[in-house]
Image: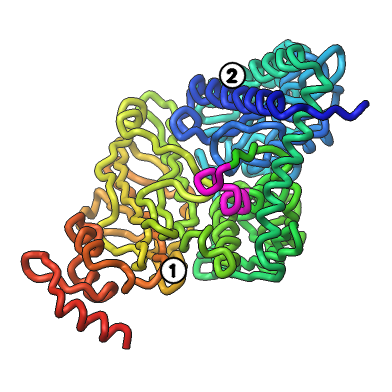
């Protein structure tokens, strides 16, 4: 094939068209889905890929899916029994063949142009229940087979004809068939316009021009990331933390160790020294999740659209400068058949540690410690008429303080970007009532020139007997402060028992199949972010505003910030100066 150099204007038009196609695919998926985790939370990813499984474009969806679909495609190509043909739709979710984790089922359709397989239209979405050992989510299971239905390159549609036996199999192996089948139908409806629009683009500009443009766009994204990596001094940068436990062996923490090696315009993330794989589902698929976390971390720090003027497309090029190493048999690269469904808190902490490792050399591009966990919680039960109900909720956290601003409060941070489920939607469709939903007022976030964000508290009340599985972490290791900022506050989960309403039971971060009675309440209190910069550099006026907004107590203002307020909540200038002198020593 002769080398084609696409002119800048055509390149921008084709790049914009690709991005629009991916956005349309994502929009179709979440608008048509029956499941709230897709319809409301938008826990999905969608895009177009070339025949070599390179990402050409991706929807503006949950960052956890950025970079994962190429691994799915490689896994499908390894396991597909019959050759691709037009009209096929393959589903795939096997964590040892590229899946991010088993509830994230991919739907993939081949794109043919003039009889040639030129690419794929694909999406992933988190399904509310795939028939696992407990409804919705799992923690304490022995192996990958306990995670529920596993699909390895299985054709749901072959040549445009639905596999009715497979469709029936799915319906009879989930607790909520209407939601799961409705979500799969939405995924099929999403890949179809991807195929159509891709072919239309090839018709309009020609195959050679379009694929020349995609190569140039990938090279451009790669060059932009390499340029920013090259600005970081060469060296090894390390950080570590720990995870509370594996969901079974309470009190046994799991180390997370990160070494970031910068050499020229390339980076390696080495996770050697982190915990060995564990006997529960608290492991991480290497291809579909561990590597994706590392790709995300560098894009978030170095290619943030809010801090650079250039638009850098989300494509394969931004993955190329990053190498990821995790020893086989570790929590970040488990050996088959270890379960690996409950993988999200670990990759949040990998991102957190990458940021912490590089913070000393790029302080202007990082935040202090964020929540860096995920409170993913599955409420479930059986309705009086005998039908299961299952609801998966991803609760918000908080960012750490950052250069020039406080950490945002009550927000999805790092790799999440899922939306909250409206409590009105909850009340209309499920036997749960949200009794409380607001920012935490029991603790103070990390103090700093820019304070940490405040976590949220949400209390849900069961209207039927039911079950609870909760995948979370950071109850023991609070978010870190930076440049003199104070540490944040750890997360909590509480149960209010209807049989003993005056008692509060503190639950561990990971709960597997907990039985609850009608009227029992579950309270989730998310972590508060760490502070950025010296708290004494925060102006007394800012501290007073926080007190007036109930973001800070009078006592905390004095102890952490050295700001003394009188009974009228006015600043006592002389007492403040004396207190700050005392704190400076």
Whether residue 143 appears in this view of the structure is: no
The picture quadrant where one finds residue 242 is bottom right
Q: Does residue 306 show up magenta in the picture?
A: yes
Whether residue 36 appears in this view of the structure is: yes
Q: Which residue is at 35% across, 33% downward?
A: 422
- What color scheme is it? rainbow
As drawn, 23 above or below 441: above
As drawn, 139 above or below 27: below
Q: Which residue is mark 1?
A: 481
Q: Is residue 420 left or right of residue 245?
A: left
Region rendered in magenta: 296-309
Q: Tag 1's secondary structure? A: loop
Residue 551, image x and y in percent? 25, 58
Q: Which residue is at 51% across, 65% downward?
A: 244
As drawn, 325 above or below 315: below
Which callout, 1 or 2, points at the residue further toward the start of the chain? 2
Compute the Cα span from label 1 to label 2: 45 Å
Foreground: disc 1 or disc 2: 1
Q: Nearer the viewer, residue 171 or 579?
A: 579
Q: Which residue is mark 2?
A: 185
Q: Which residue is at 71% across, 29% downward?
A: 8
The residue most toward the right is 1
Q: Does residue 52 show up magenta in the picture?
A: no
Answer few, some or many: residues within 10 Å of disc 2's Cα (few below 14, many 20 plus, some between 14 and 19).
some
Residue 158, image x and y in percent? 77, 16
Residue 401, image x and y in percent? 41, 60
Q: Tag 2's secondary structure? A: helix
């Amino acid at each position: 094939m002769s080398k084609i150099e696409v002119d800048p204007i055509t390149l921008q038009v084709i790049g914009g068209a690709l991005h629009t196609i991916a956005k349309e695919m994502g929009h179709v998926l979440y608008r048509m889905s029956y499941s709230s985790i897709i319809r409301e939370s938008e826990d999905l990813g969608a895009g177009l890929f070339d025949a070599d499984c390179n990402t050409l474009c991706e929807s503006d969806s949950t960052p956890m899916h950025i970079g994962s679909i190429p691994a799915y495609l490689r896994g499908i190509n390894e396991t597909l029994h019959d050759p691709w043909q037009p009209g096929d739709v393959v589903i795939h979710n096997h964590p040892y063949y590229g899946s991010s984790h088993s509830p994230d089922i991919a739907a993939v359709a081949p794109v043919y142009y003039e009889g040639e397989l030129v690419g794929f239209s694909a999406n992933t979405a988190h399904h509310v229940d795939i028939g696992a050992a407990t409804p919705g989510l799992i923690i304490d299971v022995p192996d990958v087979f306990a995670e529920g239905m596993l699909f390895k390159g299985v054709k749901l549609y072959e040549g445009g004809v639905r596999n009715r036996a497979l469709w029936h199999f799915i319906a009879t192996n989930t607790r909520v068939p209407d939601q799961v089948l409705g979500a799969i139908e939405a995924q099929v409806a999403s890949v179809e316009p991807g195929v159509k629009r891709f072919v239309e683009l090839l018709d309009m500009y020609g195959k050679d021009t379009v694929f020349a443009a995609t190569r140039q766009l990938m090279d451009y994204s790669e060059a932009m990331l390499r340029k920013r990596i090259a600005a970081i001094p060469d060296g090894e940068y390390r950080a570590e933390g720990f995870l509370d436990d594996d969901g079974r062996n309470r009190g046994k923490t799991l180390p997370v160790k990160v070494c970031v090696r910068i050499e020229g315009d390339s980076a390696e993330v080495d996770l050697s020294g982190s915990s060995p794989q564990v006997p529960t589902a608290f492991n991480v698929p290497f291809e579909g999740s561990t590597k994706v976390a590392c790709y995300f971390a560098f894009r978030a720090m170095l290619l943030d659209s809010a801090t650079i003027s250039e638009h850098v497309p989300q494509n394969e090029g931004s993955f190329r400068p990053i190498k990821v190493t995790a020893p086989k048999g570790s929590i970040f690269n488990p050996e088959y058949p270890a379960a690996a469904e409950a993988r999200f808190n670990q990759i949040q902490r990998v991102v957190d540690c990458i940021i912490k490792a590089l913070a000393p050399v790029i302080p202007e591009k990082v935040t202090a410690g964020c929540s860096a966990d995920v409170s993913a919680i599955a409420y479930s039960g059986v309705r009086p008429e005998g039908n299961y109900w299952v609801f998966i909720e991803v609760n918000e956290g908080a960012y750490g303080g950052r250069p020039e601003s406080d950490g945002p409060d009550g927000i999805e941070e790092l790799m999440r970007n899922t939306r909250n489920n409206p409590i009105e939607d909850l009340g209309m469709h499920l036997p749960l009532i949200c009794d409380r939903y607001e920012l935490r007022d029991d603790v103070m976030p990390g103090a700093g020139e820019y304070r940490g964000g405040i976590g949220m508290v949400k209390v849900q009340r069961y209207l039927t007997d039911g079950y609870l599985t909760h995948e979370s972490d950071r109850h023991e290791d609070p978010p870190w402060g930076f440049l003199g900022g104070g540490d944040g506050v750890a997360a909590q989960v509480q149960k209010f028992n209807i049989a003993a309403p005056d008692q509060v039971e503190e639950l561990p971060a990971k709960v597997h199949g907990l039985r609850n009675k009608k009227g029992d309440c579950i309270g989730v209190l998310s972590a508060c972010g760490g502070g950025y910069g010296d708290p004494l550099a925060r102006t007394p006026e800012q501290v007073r505003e926080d007190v007036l907004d109930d973001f800070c107590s009078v006592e905390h203002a004095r102890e952490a910030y050295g700001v003394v307020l009188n009974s009228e909540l006015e600043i006592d200038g002389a007492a403040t100066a004396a207190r700050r002198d005392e704190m400076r020593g």
